[in-house]
Image (cartoon, rainbow, N blue to C red):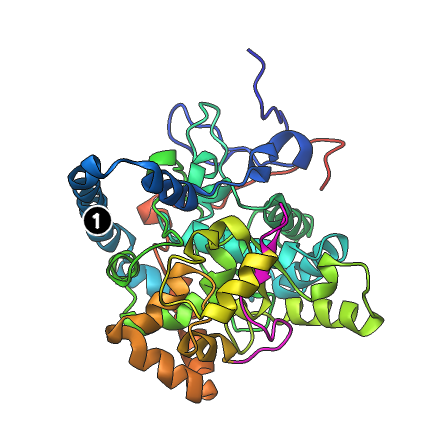
Amino acid sequence: MRRRFPPASIERGHQPPGTSYRYPHRQARQLQGFWQTHTHATAEHSKAKLRPAGVAVELSSMASLRMLRLLVAAVVLSAALMPPPSAVAQLRTDYYASVCPNLEAIVRNSVRQSMAQSQISAPATLRLFFHDCAVAGCDASIMIVNSNGDDEWRNSDNQSLKPEGFQTILSAKAAVDSDPQCRYKVSCADVMALAARESVLQVELGRYDGRVSTRVSVVLPHVNFTLDQLNAFFSGLGFSQTEMVALLGKRRLLITHLLVLCICIFNCNCKPDQVFCALHYANSMMDRSGAHTLGAADCPFFQYRIGSDQTMNPSFASQLQSTCSSSNGFAFLDPTQVTFDNAFYRNLQGGRGLLGTDQVLYSDQRSRGTVDNYATNQGAFFADFVAAVTKLGRIGVKTPATGGEIRRGKPPLGSSI
């Protein structure tokens, strides 16, 4: 049988028996799975509506079982992903200063080139960073393609990841390795961290790449999670509820099937300054505020709430109903979609949260105080968001002692990078 991911020219690092590390390098052939959109949360909700009343007890049991599984997963994540003190200590902003002094400039230039080719590359990369860190830590295991087909990116929860995110990382890693001073000295995990934040924040470096990637390891939050489910998931990653509420501003871009930048992406009536603002804000999306200010969600991720969720503002529901009348409808997560601000939290106060996991932050009294604080104190939100993103980058840091490696790879002749 012909293998789906050939590249004979990939240079492998040390790897466990039976595992093959290869870099996806052609979007059409090797990232085709990422074009699929999975709306399992919405589908499950729709199926529940069609079930007869007689299965209510069974559904309740199933819900309890799912919650139990999530709690167990959170405990396992907490134990497995908290890096040892030595791993955290090795992270520092000048980690590569002596071996690859131009690292940040190389990655920055590569990311901007990717953005010039596709404006969605920036949010896609940011979303990819979260999906990597939330599963087995920030070790670039999401980039591993196993010859046996069992890897993270082929899990259904990762199938809505955009190929532009992968291509951005691959291009940046190739650019770094093309520099003789940096060649094979910088991990893919650190390249991903730099690309996701695009030089706006000071990025701690010193991660090693993981060697293991499996479908079953992927456990990610869904758009209809309750506060208990959200807390269970994020506490497993080491986040408090307050940190989670701040980080969810970023997760708006990550957990939904998002498009980004100015509204001109979605119509042909762009003005030149709108195009400029799109590039500018994408470059600085990790600066002061949550990436929800740049996001939009496809209708299937929130349509099930319209008319059935009493926490949704009626006029907002009517607006969304009109928006979703077309087959490819979408809505912005924030009405000030090209401005970095705290409007996301003010919207929650008015019942205008787009996703179920948005509005629950305000409808549940336990997290309402944090939402109120961020809605009235933008500075507090900015500070907490930056701290939470930095903490995200410390999850599950690998070292040589814990099986980490500097992954090597070079694209085959004729590849797109």
Work out whether residue 345 can be spotted: yes
> Taking 388 as reference, is 4 above or below it?
above
147 over 247 or under it: above or below: above
Residue 40 image offset from top left, x and y in percent:
42, 41
Secondary element under disc 1, as helix, strand or loop, is: helix
Q: Can residue 98 be seen here? A: no
Q: Main secondary structure of the magenta part?
A: loop
The amino acid beneath tag 1 is Met
The answer to which quarter of the image holds residue 355 is bottom left
Residue at x 65% of width, y 36% of height: 25
Task: Report which residue position mark 1 lands on.
Answer: 67
The span shown in magenta is: 324-341
- Would you say 364 lies left or right of 267 here? left
Q: Position of residue 270 (x, y in %)?
A: 81, 66
Specify whether residue 34 is painted magenta. Answer: no
Residue 333: within the magenta? Answer: yes
Q: Which one is in front, 275 or 283?
A: 275
Residue displayed at 72% across by 67% down: 279
Screen quadrant of the N terminus? top right
Whole-percent x, y for residue 96 in the image = 53, 62
